[in-house]
Every structure is written in C-alpha cells, then in structure tokens.
Image (cartoon, rainbow, N blue to C red):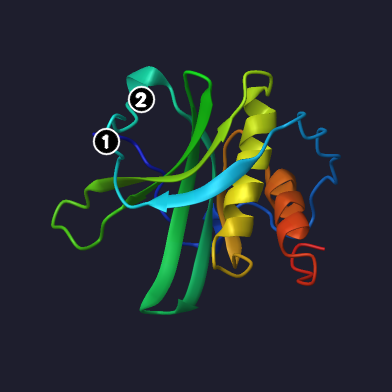
Amino acid sequence: MTHVPRAPMHPSEVPQQRVYLLKDMPERPDGFRGSCIYYEGVPQGLTEPDFADNPTLLGGVEWAWSPMHSRLDNYYIERHGKWWLLWNAFEDDNTWDWDVVWNLYGAAESEVASEYEAAIYTLMDAWAGDEVDHFHWINHEGLLSVGDMNEIARAVWPEDRRGS
C-alpha cells in the first residue's frame, strides 16, 4: 500500500506555522508554465504513481471549512519524460480500508527546471488555477518547507495575509 501522510490529530503534530525562515524563491525557469488540471483519477496513458518510481512528497495542506467539509491535499511531484506531473494523493474516507486516491492536479512541460523549481512553480500555477481560497494550515513538510509553501501562498493569494 502506498504511504500517504496521515492528517495530524493533535496540534503537536502540525509543523510550526507562524515563525519560519523567509526564503527567496528561485527564478521561474524561462518558458515554465504549469496548469491546474484537477483530473479525478489517473488519465489514460499514465499509471498511478508508484513509490518504486520515487515521486517526491512536497508537503500537505488542509482546508477545514466545517467539521463535515474539509479538503486534505498531499502533493507529490514526478518526472514523466519532458513533463513534471503534480499529483494530489489522499485517503478516501468513503471506503472501509481508506484507499489511497491519486488525482493529477497539475503539469508543466520543461526540460530545464530542477525538481525544486518544478515543485514550486507547478504548485503555484495549480493553486492559482484552482477555485479555492488560502489553505487553513500546513499539515506536513516534504521537499517544500512551511516557509516555501507560505511564500507560494502569498504569491497566489496576495490579499490574504495568512502566514505573514
């Protein structure tokens, strides 16, 4: 079974949200443009990411609008030929065994972007194209730190001062 980070069940399990190192984001690689796809499932011609292929965990965020309305996203980046694919993996609470669901969330064509640059700008472009407000908190870090994710959020939602 694929390992997807679990949602924190206690405040001590959530990374520090308010105090973080301000980091300069790397320059966007020339011609790098990602898009928000939010394809439910795995598109024909692709396979579900396999941890043997080493998709890289970027981190996870959560929206909690009410006790019955929330969204927990765990983002992974994967190289597929000349494409960077941004995946959203989550555990489906509508099944008895909490199956892991993979949705293609974003993509960008680039042969020059590093994994870190692709992670930042593919996530930024996907959030900008999604119809969602600023996340409520960061559940965990991966390749991207709390500071990275907050800086991306400030670029996408500049009028919202969360994380400042």
Q: Position of residue 130 (x, y in %)?
A: 54, 61
Q: Splitting the image into 4 quarters, where does residue 161 fall?
A: bottom right
As drawn, 16 above or below 2: below
Depth check: give the residue in front, 12 or 19: 19
How far apart marks 2 and 1 lie (CA) works out to: 20 Å
Residue bearing mark 1: 44
Q: Position of residue 48 (x, y in %)?
A: 30, 33
Residue bearing mark 2: 51
Which amino acid does the dot numbered 1 rest on?
A: Gln
Q: Residue at x 57, y 35 (%)?
A: 108
Q: Residue at x 76, y 29 (%)?
A: 29
CB within 8 Å, label 2 to label 1: no
Depth check: give the residue in front, 68 or 7: 68
- Is residue 16 left or right of 106 when viewed as pictured? right
Could you tell me how many numbered marks the image carries? 2
- Is residue 113 left or right of 130 when viewed as pictured? right
As drawn, 103 above or below 108: below
